[in-house]
Image (spheres, rainbow, N blue to C red):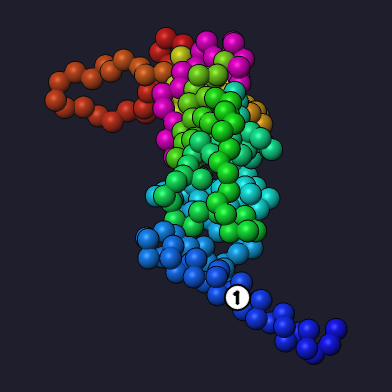
């Protein structure tokens, strides 16, 4: 290629660049949003009003899955792939029109929104994950499936009073059952961890039956504590 031909082609390139810049300037004057050419090729994430969903989504999309509670019966967002994952992100407003940092393709154009309909379980699982309800729902699952965890016979003699600070407070209908349940505490915790994941329930607080008070009058002497009168 001769220097004369290079000089002839340079004005054509300059004309294309000038026309392109002119189009961008006209778009700015009309109030349009002009793509940032310096940001092309980067991964641009939209802003969200909730901080936790963004962190959870970044961890799930980068492959760094954090160990958390597992709620039987619900589809975990980390288990989704392909069309289901894209559909859930579209439902959650990942491509919401008007959001800042809208992702674009290599040519600078807005990426087309996916209209795939996700499964209900996938949407519920993502919503639970975003709002941080995993531990609460996992604890509720333990309460409702107590007989499945410990067996029908033990469940007939025990009652879960409440779950607080990752501890299950249990009352038994006799001190004998309370003693036996204390010996089985480690096995029960292992079964709970296998069902709903670790660090959901870390301890059991086991109590005997609520005995009748035999105190009479304003004055009394402190005794040895409650005894299993009827057990």
Residue toward you, 167 or 74: 74
The magenta stretch is 148-166
| Front one among 180 and 119 | 119
Say which residue appears at 31% left-offset and 15% top-offset.
Answer: 212
Image coords of residue 41 (percent x, y): 64, 63
Q: Residue at x 57, y 15 (%)?
A: 147
Query: Based on the displayed image, in which of its 4 quarters is residue 11 positioned?
Result: bottom right
x then y, percent, for residue 91: 51, 36
- In the rendered view, would you say 6 is above or below 105? below
The residue singled out by tag 1 in the image is 15
Q: Examine the rendering and report whether any part of residue 46 can be seen.
A: yes
Q: Is residue 192 above or below residue 99?
A: above
Q: Nearer the viewer, residue 174 or 107?
A: 107
Residue 124 is situated, as x and y percent measured from the top left of the image, at 51, 29
Camera sees residue 199: no
> Residue at image x 55%, y 51%?
110
Judge by depth and name the residue closer to the eye, 6 or 97. 6
Magenta-drawn stretch contains 163:
yes
Is residue 96 on the magenta stretch?
no
Quadrant hosting residue 79: top right
């Amino acid at each position: 290629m001769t220097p004369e031909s290079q000089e002839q082609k340079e004005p054509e390139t300059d004309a294309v660049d000038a026309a392109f810049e002119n189009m961008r300037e006209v778009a700015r004057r009309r109030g349009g949003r002009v793509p940032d050419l310096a940001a092309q090729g980067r991964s641009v994430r939209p802003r969200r009003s909730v901080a936790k969903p963004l962190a959870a989504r970044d961890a799930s999309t980068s492959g760094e899955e954090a160990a958390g509670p597992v709620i039987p019966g619900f589809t975990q967002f980390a288990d989704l792939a392909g069309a289901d994952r894209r559909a859930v992100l579209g439902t959650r407003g990942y491509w919401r029109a008007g959001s800042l940092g809208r992702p674009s393709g290599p040519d600078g154009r807005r990426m087309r929104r996916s209209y795939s309909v996700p499964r209900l379980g996938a949407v519920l699982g993502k919503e639970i994950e975003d709002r941080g309800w995993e531990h609460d729902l996992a604890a509720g699952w333990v309460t409702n499936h107590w007989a499945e965890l410990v067996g029908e016979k033990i469940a007939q003699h025990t009652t879960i009073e409440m779950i607080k600070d990752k501890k299950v407070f249990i009352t038994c209908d006799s001190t004998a059952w309370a003693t036996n349940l204390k010996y089985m505490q480690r096995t029960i915790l292992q079964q709970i961890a296998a069902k709903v994941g670790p660090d959901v329930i870390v301890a059991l607080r086991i109590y005997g039956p609520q005995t009748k008070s035999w105190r009479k009058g304003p004055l009394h002497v402190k005794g040895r504590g409650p005894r299993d009168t009827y057990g």
